[in-house]
Image (tube, rainbow, N blue to C red):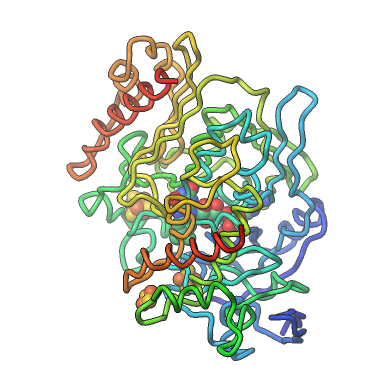
């Protein structure tokens, strides 16, 4: 089985995995980091969103072996219950969830979305491609569209992200 | 998923050599389409050649004043590139209208062009599908065909090509650059790159087995108002029912390509001569010979109206 080194939430791990193992299954089944969720396993829901080398991706649609040497941040790496990431705290404050299943993916995505806006990456909701994108509700809704919430916590999620963005600005 | 072996190629030459050497080998880039299909065993390569390390991930200005986009440039990076945002607005807009932020961070230029259809029967391995299993029949003909093609269809297949990016590439006259196992490079105009289904819908492009896309080039910027309008069942994160990519010049001339209507991005250069006469005149030429099903006949008026909205927007500013 191919060997692989992954840095996950700052800790280095040596893994020997079947080539078929997705990054999602490597995290959940092999590293027992079960915060990252499997919703659809086909890129359609965003529950598996993690941040790899600074970018949010769907962990279900990528193979672990394709990430030799990569640095992965999962929900467990963003914050702990006793020391939550500001985005986690804002989700709690604004009730940005109901059942919580989509939440780790939503939070990872939200953290990356604010970085993407800061980096000037445009979206479908950006009226002017020549201008720097702003944190507006329309931008957040569009940019978060890859994260489905079966419980429909969308408006509270937008409130949570808006608050964190305001604090960051 | 079926078992497969895996290797990382370090150069295009190494990648094509590996593809020739290993029967049943496939390249993997972002993996967002290939792995989706491998999980369902619709694709079952025996060997994967990871092309992410090929250093084909930069966007360069060409001597002619156009752009050469590496095959591995991610959709996010292409859409965000300052030159693309300024000179090829249509491309940026089409990319941003597709998939999700997470997917665009992985999806590559070459992978996007080569993504396979979203026909639900292609995805359902219990159903006949000539594309998935040549000769088995087409469940979409006479089945649920709301999303399917209205132009260039055949008795064998009525699937669409789902890419938004490819529609912009078609309007911008992109050229696909490849290298083959014998080392020969070729340049394929985007108009000739995707095939119509005919009697072999499993063949979607003119690429030979093991042929690697190295880049996509764009000619010098053509200016004009560039608008991509995508009509879909929800406001984001959904494939197009129809889409219109248009480049409209001040004098009213321009170019129009359609998505969601055929097995390839649909452009009829002759129809563009009708632009001064308005959306109906253009749509009549673009949609000539359409053979919709009962369920997707709505796409014909939808194309005309979407084009009308695009032309009004272009006039407006
Ligand atoms: C939920 C979901 C929603 C989506 N919505 C949209 C949408 O709205 N609009 C849209 O346009 N797309 C959409 N997509 C599709 C997405 O754009 C494609 O999956 C993506 O562009 C494929 O690129 P990739 O690099 O991941 O390709 P891969 O999956 O890596 O490869 C795809 C194919 O290309 C081949 N290949 C890759 N690179 C090369 C190369 N250099 N040379 C030769 N062959 C190569 C592979 O062998 C494979 O056959 C969606 C996908 C998902 C999962
Ligand atoms: S339309 Fe094409 S892809 Fe869909 S079932 Fe028919 S043959 Fe298969
Ligand atoms: S589990 Fe990955 S997108 Fe749904
Ligand atoms: S909180 Fe239940 S799915 Fe989002």
Is B231 or A86 nearer to us in this picture? Answer: A86
Q: Where is residue B115 in the image (x, y as percent from the top left)?
A: 52, 52
Tell me: B290 left or right of A59: left
Is B42 or A75 nearer to us in this picture? Answer: A75
Residue B205 sits in which quadrant? top right
Q: Residue furthest left?
A: B294
> In the rendered view, would you say B206 is above or below A147?
above
Q: Position of residue B92 (x, y in %)?
A: 56, 39
> In the rendered view, would you say A65 is above or below B202?
below
Q: Residue at x 20, y 50 (%)?
A: B142
Q: Residue at x 50, y 77 (%)?
A: A104
Q: Residue at x 59, y 37 (%)?
A: A131
Is A139 or A70 nearer to us in this picture? Answer: A139
> In the rendered view, would you say B151 is above or below B3?
above
Residue B116 in sight from this viewpoint:
no
Q: Where is residue A157 in the image (x, y as percent from the top left)?
A: 42, 67
Residue B249 in sight from this viewpoint:
yes
Q: Residue at x 38, y 45 (%)?
A: B240
Tell me: A115 left or right of B167: right
Q: Position of residue B76 (x, y in %)?
A: 61, 50
Residue A156 sits in which quadrant? bottom left
């Amino acid at each position: 089985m191919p060997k692989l080194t992954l840095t996950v939430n700052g800790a280095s791990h040596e893994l020997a995995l079947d080539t078929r193992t997705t990054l999602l299954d490597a995290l959940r089944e092999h590293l027992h980091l079960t915060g990252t969720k499997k919703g659809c396993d086909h890129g359609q829901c965003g529950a598996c969103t993690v941040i790899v080398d600074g970018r949010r991706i769907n962990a279900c649609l990528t193979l672990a072996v394709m990430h030799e040497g990569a640095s992965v941040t999962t929900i467990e790496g963003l914050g702990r219950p006793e020391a939550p990431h500001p985005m986690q705290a804002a989700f709690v404050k604004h009730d940005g969830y109901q059942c919580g299943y989509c939440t780790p993916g939503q939070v990872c995505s939200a953290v990356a979305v604010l970085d993407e806006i800061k980096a000037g990456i445009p979206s479908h909701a950006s009226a002017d491609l020549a201008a720097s994108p702003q944190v507006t509700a329309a931008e957040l809704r569009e940019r978060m569209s890859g994260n489905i919430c079966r419980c429909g916590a969308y408006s509270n999620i937008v409130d949570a992200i808006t608050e964190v963005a305001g604090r960051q600005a | 998923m079926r078992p497969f072996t895996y290797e990382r190629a370090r150069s295009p030459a190494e990648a094509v050599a590996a593809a020739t050497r290993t029967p049943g080998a496939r390249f993997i880039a972002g993996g967002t389409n290939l792995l989706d299909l491998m999980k369902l065993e619709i694709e079952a390569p025996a060997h994967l050649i990871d092309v992410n390390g090929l250093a084909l991930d930069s966007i360069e200005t060409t001597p002619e004043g156009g752009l050469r986009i590496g095959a591995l440039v991610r959709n996010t990076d292409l859409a965000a590139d300052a030159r693309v945002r300024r000179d090829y607005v249509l491309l940026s807009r089409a990319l941003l209208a597709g998939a999700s932020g997470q997917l665009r961070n992985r999806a590559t230029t070459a992978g996007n062009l080569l993504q396979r259809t979203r026909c639900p029967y292609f995805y359902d391995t219990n159903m006949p599908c000539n594309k998935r299993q040549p000769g088995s029949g087409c469940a979409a003909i006479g089945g649920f065909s709301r999303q399917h093609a209205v132009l260039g269809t055949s008795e064998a297949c009525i699937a669409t090509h789902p890419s938004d990016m490819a529609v912009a590439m078609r309007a911008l006259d992109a050229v696909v650059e490849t290298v083959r196992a014998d080392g020969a490079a070729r340049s394929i105009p985007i108009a000739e790159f995707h095939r119509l289904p005919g009697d072999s819908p499993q063949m979607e492009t003119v690429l030979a087995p093991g042929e690697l896309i190295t880049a996509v080039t764009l000619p010098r910027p053509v200016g004009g108002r560039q608008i991509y309008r995508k009509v879909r069942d929800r406001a984001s994160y959904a494939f197009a029912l129809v889409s219109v990519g248009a480049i409209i010049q001040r004098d009213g001339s321009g170019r129009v390509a359609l998505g969601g209507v055929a097995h390839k991005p649909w452009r009829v250069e002759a129809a563009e001569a009708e632009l001064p006469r308005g959306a109906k005149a253009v749509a009549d030429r673009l949609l000539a010979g359409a053979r919709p099903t009962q369920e997707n006949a709505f796409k014909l008026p939808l194309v005309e109206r979407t084009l009308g909205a695009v032309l009004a927007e272009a006039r407006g500013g």
